[in-house]
Image: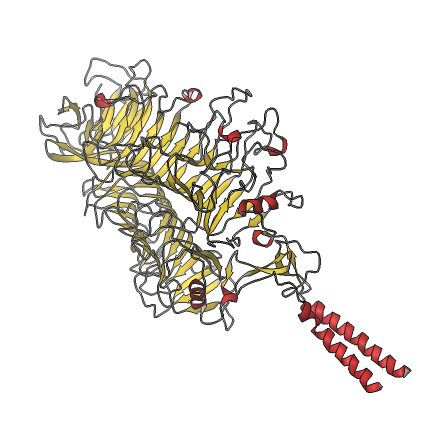
Amino acid sequence: MKIPTFGMGWVVVGMLMLLPFAVSPTQVSAQCTGSKGNNAVYAGCGLQGSTAFIDAGAFSSSGDICARIHAVLTSGYPASGAVIDARGIRPPGGGSTQLCSTNPWAGITTPSTVLLPSGTIQISVQWALPSGTRIVGEGSGAPGAGVTTVQAASGFANAAAMIKMGTATGATGVSVEDLALDGNGTAVSGISNSLARDLSYVRRLSLSNIAGTGLLISSGAQNSGPYSDINFSSTAASAVCASIQGASTSTRGIHGLTCTGNVSGTALPVAVLLDAPNNTIEDVRVSGFTDGIKLGQNLPTQGDVLSNISGGPNVTSIIHIANAHLVSDLSVVGVAKNGATNAINDQESLPSSSHLIADSSVAIYVLGEQVTAQTTVIGFSRFTTSKSANAPTWATGNAAIASGTACSQPGSLYSNRNGSINGGLGHGNTWYVCQGSPSTWNDVF
Amino acid sequence: MSRAKTVAFGWIFAGTLAGLGGWLVVSPMPARAQTPGNNAVYNTSGIVTSSAAFIDASAVTQGSDICATLFSIISSTNYPGHAAVIDARGISNTTGSPNMLTCNSGSPWTQGNGQRTNSNTTTNPATILLPAGTIYISTSWILPNFAQVAGEGKAATVIKACSTGTAGCSANFAPPAWDNSWPGGPANGVNAMVELGSPFGTTGSCGQTCFCPGGLGSTDCNSVGVRDFTLDGAGQNINGIVNQVSQELTFVDDVALNNIEGIGLWIGNDANPDAVTSVGAIEAGNSGPYSNLVFNAGTGALSTTECVNLQAGTRGVHGMSCTANGTPAAAIYLDGSNNSIEDVQITGFQDGVLIGSQALSTLATNFRNNLLLNIGAISGVTNVVHICGPNPPNGSAACAETNNPAADLTIVGASNLGVISASITTIRDDETETALADASVAMYVLGEQTPNGSTTQYTRFTTSPRLPSWATGNVAITANSACTGNGSLYSRDVASTGTVLWACVNSVWTPIR
């Protein structure tokens, strides 16, 4: 009797030990279903899989992070796209750096939103993002200290750019936000866009250790942007912070950009190259570059707007209007030196001997178009509030100017709000012109 | 025997305890009551429990369509009083194409298309995350105060107007009649696929069915926003997004407006008091920004198709492309004050930005201080910027409305992108009888009408050399040299003796001093 009784007890024990698996809510009802990568949510039947997003860490455990994202994109992936949450994929050996040896979007044409994890993802090849692809990190941090950092491996295979926006002409809806790109000192650019157009943008991005161009926007990327809140830092001699190139590369602009080059040593050549029409660049800070924004170096350009541009240490000219190609209809609103040598270097419309505007700040410098006398170009339509001796301006006041009073800007005008006509041309005290050598104020009316 | 029974019962008891303990350890069952739609998370005891951080709409009892499901959640008596995030990204079509959803029942906040009642309408705020795929809608989605809707990107999430014959749609899209009759709305009726708040209420009081607090047009909505999807009008003469009443922190971001033959984005100033209820003016002032937008009217665009109609003072339209087939009269109608419109590219509209063309009586004396920055036309545009007024240039026909004088208008960077043609005007100013065919114009600032002058005398500055401007250079002008832009000045910026200032008089540079 003892043995059977004892045995029944063990049977019961065993059955009870299995109880949790028998009644687990994941199997409590045939109605509850789920697939790998589904989020677990509560439903009437218990825990159920939700396709609100696909957890890439749970979807596949094979390969590196890029292989695992690619696995999601190529295995039963919805044709209309999905959110892929890769934030749970951690370095297999611990630490904060994980490797990526392939382009996750190779051969992909369906849209996706991919959430990247914090830490460093070291890529060996370019990420080429097809139309409708959005990648979002956990934060850009600061250059060299990103929350989510995509870093070029030392043997990075494609020298063009770490991330390429678009894989075919006319791509749309390609975006990169909230992450850092680290060029790791290689001859690589950060982001290039020559294909993606409407609703393609970059937001909250830091760029560091890049020896190429941080943000390279070229022909084919018209209507793309805005490219906003970008922080670039590099001391590589060949580094360029941003570049917009192309006769028809009109974008929604760069809004919010900090470019830091070599602040204490030899300044890098150019922070921003602008050789494209109809672009807005605003809220920019530059230090450690000889030129802040240089226009007309490679192509003619017109219709651009620069707003709130300031310099810093080791900057020679915040804005450099080159004369290699025609620059016209350029509006500059708000330039501050903040330690730079010159606010504006205008080689297009100012003579070579006096092409520098060195005011601490300039409210407006608008360069219009070439003006002719007969067929000879005599100058440019232009208006500036600068008090520089090299650029005539128009001043107003409420007092007459005494005869022979010196002035510094030949060609400048002065209007006296309280003036009167005292005998016609050359005899009034209402309107004056700065004239002669040495220059003095002479009345006109 | 007695001892044997004791041992046996002892083992049974021990086994029971062990089993119960094991069940508690590994069971994912919640430590407290679970609510369908809750997320599953581990608590501090390592037990899976439910979290109300968001509501997964795919896990609740499904309604007849996605809108019915969402309405059921939002209108539930258990719905959090201060709104919630509703994650609907997991909802898919289980009977047909998984990427095609229909919304015949109404909207997430209203069910049916008849007069609203407390049972078929909720105005609880929510942040709704929409799934990828196409959602066919049969009526307007009117978002109440504080509500937001986000898609997975314009390439992934498409909200499309129902058309007769479309699978799952019983008829063409039709807005609710009670909303479409609001007198201050667009000329073709509100007709909105998505409406940011609504001024409409039942006569006297709308109670729980007020989309904005206070109801009946007395108070505005706030923080209503939509982003990251495409609205597809399916070629119908309906409007995309209409905002009549939502103000601070209201936004539209990263939205494509396709195949809409009405108005893509209408931002209103309810200048016309409601004749029925004597409700005063309410508007969408201080709303915005409206950023990163695409409007493509498709091949069936009408003369009345519009990209944007802006009548209020807002935080601006920043980044937009407007494309049509050349038939529509204008892309952007600007009839409000204190707006910035920047980084806009236009194709296939007769006018790019048309200013002051609408007969809005209460706006006539308040229409000023707008900034246009980086406005470009690519092709198929006659006037990139057109300022209406009583003095059209070159015998051109005046706008239908000429009594809304634009003042203190600043244009920085207007361009036809290099296409110089006599038929393309970069800036047409009917206030000052001006037509500029420059490929681009850096600055055109129209100030105010000069006191006691004729109707064409304005303070104005432009860098266009075809108008009175001011040029500088280091060249002394040869006598009797021809010039353009009568009235222009030229300063020689060289410290030397001789003439320093010339004027363009009768098309000849004439020395002044």
The foreground one among A31 and A224 is A31
The foreground one among B475 and B60 is B60
* Residue B474 in sight here: no
Residue B404, quarter of picture = top left
For the N terminus of chain A, the image quarter is: bottom right
* Residue B373 in sight here: yes
Is B453 placed left or right of A39 in the picture? left
For the C terminus of chain A, the image quarter is: top left
Q: How many marks?
A: 0
- Location of residue B447 with respect to B156 vertically, above or below: above
The residue shown at (23%, 35%) is: A368
Pinpoint residue A209: horizontal percent, then vertical percent: 37, 61
The residue shown at (24%, 14%) is: A421
Q: How does the figure colour the protein chain or chains?
A: secondary structure
Pinpoint residue A40: horizontal percent, then vertical percent: 59, 60
Residue A223, quarter of picture = top left
Is B389 placed left or right of B122 in the picture? left
Pinpoint residue B14: horizontal percent, then vertical percent: 79, 76
- Location of residue A350 with respect to A299 vertically, above or below: above
Residue at the extreme left: B479
The residue shown at (49%, 51%) is: B131
- Location of residue A315 with respect to A188 vertically, above or below: above
Pinpoint residue A134: horizontal percent, then vertical percent: 42, 54
